[in-house]
Each structure stands twice: as C-alpha cells, then as structure tokens.
Amino acid sequence: MATIGEYAAMPVISRFFGIVITMYHNEHGPPHFHVRHGDAYASVEILSGRLRGELPPNVLRHVRVWMTAHKKELLDNWTRAQARGSLSRIAPLE
C-alpha cells in the first residue's frame, strides 16, 4: 500500500461524497485503485473487490457500487497506468 506522501502524487480519477479515488502509475500487483475519505485509506482490487486498509462501512458501500458501475473504465485506466499513460477521469457516483 502507498504511503501518505506517495498518495498525494497519485492522479485523482474520481471524487464523490468526500471520497477521493486515485490510481498510481506503474504499480505492481493485481489491478487496484486507492480510496481516501478523511483519515481513512484503503486500496481495492478491481476484479475481486478485496480491500486492503479500512474504510467506514457507508464509504465502502459507495465505493463498491461505483466500482461495479465503472469496472471496464478502471481496468482501462490500470492498463494506461502500467504504460505510464494519462489516466481518464471516471464519473462520480451520484
């Protein structure tokens, strides 16, 4: 998992309900994204939904709904991130 300093350098791909979603370029491991809400921080695997870290239950629920709706876009961004390409913004949960 990224440190707070590394987290600040990650491109933001979406924001909603005080939740910030980021993805880091050229990161290893299964495809995943990072989530911050206040002091809570976690990474979420795109294919399995596995959570590393802790998020409040309502935040995790919002993130999982958003992830399900945007899985293809997240995987496309993961591919671009691995190639150090520009990441696309993804629509927020409304």
Image (cartoon, rainbow, N blue to C red):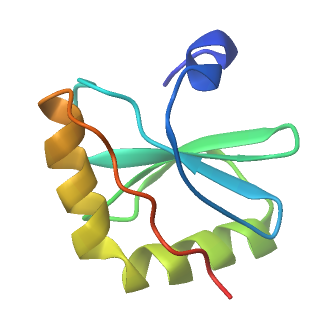
Residue 27 placement (x, y as % from top left): 28, 25
Viewed as shown, does residue 81 lie left or right of 18? left
Residue at left 66%, top 78%? 61
Looking at the image, is 80 positioned above or below residue 62?
A: above
- Please give the count of numbered marks on the rendered protein: 0
Name the residue furthest right. Answer: 38
Residue at left 51%, top 29%? 10
Viewed as shown, does residue 13 lie left or right of 58? left
Residue 58 placement (x, y as % from top left): 79, 75
Residue at left 23%, top 23%? 26
* Residue 30 appears in the rendering: no
Viewed as shown, does residue 84 lie left or right of 6? left
Viewed as shown, does residue 30 lie left or right of 33? left
Residue 77 placement (x, y as % from top left): 26, 52
Looking at the image, is 33 positioned above or below residue 11?
A: below
**Where's the C terminus, which quadrant?**
bottom right
Residue 53 or residue 90, whichever sits in front: 90
* Residue 76 appears in the rendering: yes
Residue at left 51%, top 75%? 91
